Amino acid sequence: MNDKIFEILQYERISSALADQAQTSLGKEAARALKPDTDLSSVQKLLQATHEAFHVDRLKGSPPFGGIVDIRPAVQRARIGGMLNPHELLGIATTLYGSRRLRRFIQTVHEEHPVELLDGLAELISEQKELERLINSCIGESAEVMDSASPTLANIRRELRGGESRIREKLESMIRSSSVAKMLQDQLITIRGDRFVIPVKSEYRSHFGGIVHDQSSSGATMFIEPEAIVAMNNKLRETKLREIQEVEIILQKLTAAVGEQSDLLAYDVDVLAQLDFIFAKGRLAHRMKATEPTMNDRGYLRIRKGRHPLIDSKAVVPLDVELGGDFSSIIVTGPNTGGKTVTLKTIGLLSMMAMSGLFVPADEGCELCVFDAIYADIGDEQSIEQSLSTFSSHMTNIIRILKDMTPKSLVLLDEVGAGTDPAEGSALAIAILEYIHQFNCRMVATTHYSELKAYAYERDGVINASMEFDVATLSPTYRLLVGVPGRSNAFAIAERLGLPGKILSFARGEVKEEDLRVENMISALEENRLGAEAEREEAERLRREMEELRTRHERELEKQESQREARLEKAENEARDIIAKARKEADEVVSELRRLAMEEGASVKEHKLIAARRQLDEAEPEARVKKVKKPTGAKASQKIGAGDEVILSNLGQRGHVIELDGKDALVQVGIMKMKVSLDSLERVQTAPVAAPKQKPVTAVKRTKDDSTRSELDLRGTNLEEALIETDRFLDEAFLSNMGQVYLIHGKGTGILRTGIQEHLRRHKLVKSYRLGNYGEGGNGVTVAELN
């Protein structure tokens, strides 16, 4: 893309604003070098990275870039064998620490909110913990080589401190002497040229031995190194030279370690620069209140409420424009200062921002195109040096555009054909626009020529547009009206300003009839547009109201559904409580039946069974699903006969009909016989089963003479099956008045025996239990005594 377009559209101000959002010099450098990309997949990837950074910044705040500096020069010197100084080494250590912290930050965010691209970049950062530890063990926070860098350096510095201490003690003893004190300008110890000296009055120079190292500007003070400490200072100097040599050895060792990792460090710096650059794009999107555009490469763009990013957001008028759908070229007409040039620059700059992976200041739903190049001829480019007029300058630029453009280019032309004779200029403008349109470029052009309005009206794929002008206030509104050509408004403005009517009438008479028809047509279009705009606003208002009603209706449905779920849950809980209550009462009824059986000596009277059954009927839950009403009376008696298998609806038990007695029937349920109403019976077997004739009875009586077994063989069953069989067996044995029963479980692993005995221990019919004696089966049998 031609560098001139960046200057015309002021793209460098966008990259400068982006650089201001970067936190490191690395990121700022990458931001200033930003250029649009012309590959769709690359642009989409850039926008995805900006999207991730935008949301990370919103959810977690700015990532930590503290301590990261540009270490590339230091790394390069280490690679070629130069020695790094402590400041450069400290910068490498802080950068390693900062990069590791940034990597962990991104990985932590990725675990909560996936950011695939950022996490992939963070994974590329190498963790040079050993190099960081090595540098930090030798270089302090103030970029000084620490004593701990090596044992030799620690010993040397101990000697230095000891030597300095001894020299100071010697000098302090001298300056406290009364004979020496009177020769001193001040009683203090100072340093000149790394040697300890004392200030001596110049008149005592000959009386004071030693070496003069300096004198004051007035010459009144001489800084003398006494002879007594010359040797001591010499030794101290030698020790300092040894210190310098040892420090160089340490720095060379650290530099070599950096040189070994130079390739990784250089790569890490590039990744860090890229991450800072990406997060800067996310922060710029927040500052501009920008949104992510959808991108395509088919030459289509739709901008919704687009704002020029370099104009104050409080003053800028949003732009709505669509290009590349029903029409590929837009011809914008209208008065000067109406905003035509700003419209061109907004379209071009937003396209370039999107192609650079930046969000654009526009509403959601914005779609932009990845062009192979953007060309623009905007502004007055008159060149005095080249002796070019405004027209010549524009034509030179347009000729360059016509030579370089392709069908996938965007061309922006401002005041095409201006600067020459109107008749020739308009004809030339039409020819240029037609050539570009036939080339199938995407084009937006502005003009003052009324002839271009007719051209746009007659050509397929070309549409008129204008900048709205408010005649009432005599000022432009800066709104782009696509589909409506611009009007002159000269007569209306002159009339509002007070130009005499006679002059206006004469002027209107001078206007050609064709031009007048065009103006009348435009006026009618304007009226229709205003009416359509009002209707559109009313439709939009109704749409918003319907949207609000729909949202409110959905909330109400959600509320009702929630209440319904709550009621169902409450009903289920109540049903469970009712069932639990019914089961409890049923257990009490069964217990009462057993107690009656014991009291009556194995004989239960009919009226007591009926009373117990009535109690069980009353325990049935009241809240129950209505059942289909069964036929009653004679109709029921025709359907149920002796021997039929029936269900007692009140008890939920199966039984067999023994005989019928009018509206009642004698039914055998298990080991019990009871007289019940036909209304409470439901036949489950269509064919009657022959039943032995028995005399009507009203009681149940089981004795030891009946054929009830006294032993139960449980071998071969699992524990669960064995317990069920044991319960059934104990109930039958109890009703048969048996006092002792035998449970055969075998020896085996003992699991069955242990489970049965544990069950017998809690069973309410069992008085006691024991293992079988010799002759009864031993450990393979459990003998239970019943109540």
Image: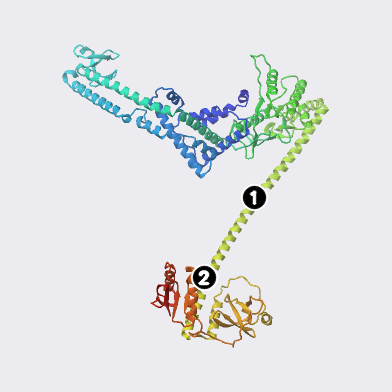
Identity, as a three-letter code, of the amino acid under mark 1: Glu
Residue on which disc 2 sits: 580
Residue at the image position 70 percent from the left and 43 percent from the top: 537
Q: Secondary structure at mark 1?
A: helix
Dot 1 or dot 2: first in sequence order is 1
Q: Which quadrant of the rendered structure holds the N terminus?
A: top right
Identity, as a three-letter code, of the amino acid under mark 2: Ala
Q: Secondary structure at mark 2?
A: helix
Residue at the image position 78 percent from the left and 31 percent from the top: 459
**Can residue 494 be seen here?**
no
Q: Position of residue 276 (x, y in %)?
A: 50, 33
Q: Which numbered dot is residue 193?
A: none
Crowd band around label 1 with a 10 angstrom C-alpha radius: few (<14), some (14–19), many (20+): few
The residue most toward the front is 775
Q: Position of residue 226 (x, y in %)?
A: 21, 17
Which image quadrant is residue 435 in?
top right
**Would residue 562 appear left or right of 156 to someone viewing this image?**
right
Q: Is residue 654 above or below residue 196?
A: below
User: Which of pointers 1 and 2 indicates the residue nearer the eye?
Assistant: 2
Residue on which disc 1 sits: 548
Q: Nearer the viewer, residue 502 or 541?
A: 541
Q: Are marks 1 and 2 in contact (CB under 8 Å)?
A: no
